[in-house]
Image (cartoon, rainbow, N blue to C red):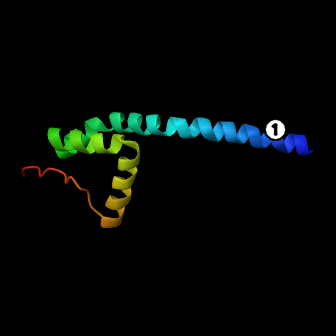
Amino acid sequence: MAVMRHVMRYGQLRVARRLARAVPWVGAAVAVLAVGSAIRRKGVVGGTVDTALNAVPLLGAAKGVVESIRGRDFIPDRRLLP
């Protein structure tokens, strides 16, 4: 039974390590997919800067946490004319 626990632990660590390596790529892919809506909401420069900040792994996570605490975006949405 001890051998099975060791094998399971080894497999879990391998999967966790592989997922940890994939996280930055997944975050960057999500940011790239969201660039279109960010540009429509914030304008070309604001949407591009917002997406670039979100694509950087640790910076994007920190930006999201701070924005959720503040309750508003660092780069506000553009104002549409009535």
Q: Label 1 belongs to which residue?
A: 7
- Depth check, front residue: 3 or 37: 3
Amino acid under disc 1: Val
Q: Is residue 40 left or right of residue 66?
A: left
Q: Residue at x 73, y 37 (%)?
A: 11
Q: Quadrant of the N terminus?
A: top right
Q: Residue furthest right?
A: 1
Task: Give the answer, above or below, for where 11 lies relative to 66.
Answer: above
- Depth check, front residue: 31 or 59: 59
Q: Residue at x 25, y 42 (%)?
A: 38
Residue 51, position as x, y percentages in the image: 28, 41
Query: Secondary structure under badge 1?
Result: helix
Residue 59, position as x, y percentages in the image: 35, 49
Q: Quadrant of residue 56?
A: top left
Task: Give the answer, above or below, for where 41 lies relative to 29.
Answer: below
Q: Residue furthest left?
A: 81
